[in-house]
């Protein structure tokens, strides 16, 4: 008869469950992934404002919606600020994943976009908001460099999110134009163009050599945003030839996105679809800014944005309550 095996180690012990259960801190798991969709709504608001000017339509209802949107954006920024205040190191954990990197970048870009929206009513306040947004984005860019340098080699590859992290300052150029700060707008344009060109080149080389996994393909839409914003700022600072050049670049990127739309969306809806929202809104603004025959394309893009951006934003933002969005995007808890 065989002997029973001897147990040489004690079974692993587990800590007793907390009682009463630990109450989570307020906004401790605010997901940065809410901000790409919010930036898309802000971009849509700016495009609508421009479209109403072109059509000569009363802007009162649009301005009321813009006011409501700014309240939502302010609440989201407050929630993120409270999360960071609980435990500042949570920022580094969030920046370890792509949704977090995109989220923090679009949060500070959203501050700059808010300045553009506020500028017609309170230019002094808008100027302060713009400076705060630029400072926050600069701090984020420096932090991202540190994260990339210290992180694993596999996380250092170029991604479309780099446009948000390192070129997102150009949103400040749009706000600067609204405030009449032409020199600042031109400086931001000159500073960000070579960075965007480098990211486009590296991304194209990477795309040729390696196909991105299906869940990450929606991020490819981000490549459209810098081109569109360069059009707006270049036209605003009196560089029409440069604006037309980037309009051509944007047209090529947009056409590619449309041709390969089925391939890009093969994995179905996810919170990363927020990456579709602000590029298409920016493209609408860019075409409307160029005027003449481009305005027809701008109106088509604006109509498409009206159908697409709010729908995607709602699908993303409704996941925020109950921590569903945080779980789906690996948001860290403070």
Image (spheres, rainbow, N blue to C red):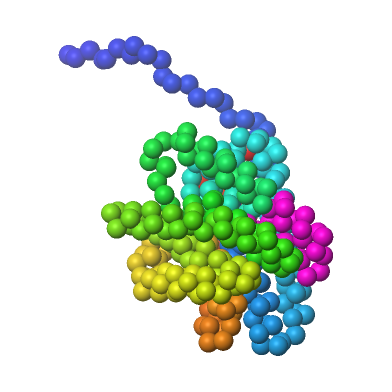
Of the pair 280 and 38, the residue shown nearer to us? 280
State the extent of the magenta-drawn residues as a range: 109-133
User: Residue 144's x, y, as percent?
Assistant: 53, 42
Residue at 70% x, 88% y is: 56
Looking at the magenta stretch, what is its main secondary structure? helix
Residue 88 image offset from top left, x and y in percent: 65, 36
Residue at 66% x, 88% y is 55
Residue 266 drawn in magenta: no
Is 7 above or below relative to 117?
A: above
Quadrant into which the N terminus falls: top left
Q: Is residue 5 visible to the viewer in this orientation of the structure? A: yes
Vertical side of 56 occupied by 47: above or below: above
Q: Residue at x 38, y 71 (%)?
A: 256
Residue 41 pos. (x, y %): 62, 67
Residue 113 visible in the snapshot: no
| Figure label count | 0
Where is residue 65? Give x, y as percent: 73, 73
Using the rendered view, name the quadrant where residue 67 is placed. bottom right
Q: Is residue 84 left or right of residue 2?
A: right
Residue drawn at point x = 53 percent, y = 87 percent: 293
Quadrant containing the C terminus in the rendered view: top right
Res. 106 image quadrant: bottom right
């Amino acid at each position: 008869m065989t002997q029973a095996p001897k147990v040489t180690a004690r079974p692993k012990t587990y800590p007793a469950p907390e009682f009463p259960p630990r109450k989570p801190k307020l906004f401790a798991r605010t997901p940065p992934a809410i901000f790409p969709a919010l930036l898309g709504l802000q971009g849509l608001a700016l495009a609508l404002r421009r479209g109403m000017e072109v059509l000569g339509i009363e802007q009162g209802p649009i301005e009321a919606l813009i006011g409501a949107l700014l309240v939502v954006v302010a609440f989201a920024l407050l929630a993120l600020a409270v999360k960071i205040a609980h435990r500042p190191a949570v920022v580094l954990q969030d920046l370890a994943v792509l949704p977090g990197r995109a989220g923090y970048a679009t949060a500070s870009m959203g501050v700059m976009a808010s300045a553009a929206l506020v500028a017609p009513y309170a230019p002094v306040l808008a100027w302060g908001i713009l400076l705060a947004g630029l400072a926050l984005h600069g701090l984020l860019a420096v932090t991202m460099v540190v994260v990339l340098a210290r992180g694993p080699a596999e996380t250092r590859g170029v991604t479309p999110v780099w446009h948000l992290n390192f070129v997102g300052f150009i949103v400040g150029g749009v706000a600067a134009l609204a405030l009449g700060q032409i020199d600042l707008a031109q400086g931001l344009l000159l500073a960000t163009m070579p960075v965007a060109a480098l990211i486009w080149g590296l991304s194209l080389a990477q795309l040729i050599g390696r196909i991105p996994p299906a869940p990450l393909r929606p991020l490819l839409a981000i490549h459209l945003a810098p081109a569109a914003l360069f059009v707006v700022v270049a036209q605003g600072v009196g560089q029409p030839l440069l604006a037309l050049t980037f309009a051509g670049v944007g047209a090529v990127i947009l056409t590619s996105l449309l041709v390969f739309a089925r391939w890009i969306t093969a994995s179905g809806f996810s919170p990363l679809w927020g990456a579709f929202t602000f590029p298409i809104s920016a493209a609408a603004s860019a075409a409307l800014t160029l005027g003449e025959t481009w305005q027809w394309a701008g109106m088509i893009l604006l109509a498409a944005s009206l159908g697409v951006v709010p729908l995607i934003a709602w699908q993303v933002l409704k996941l925020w309550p109950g921590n569903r969005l945080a779980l789906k995007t690996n948001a860290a808890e403070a």
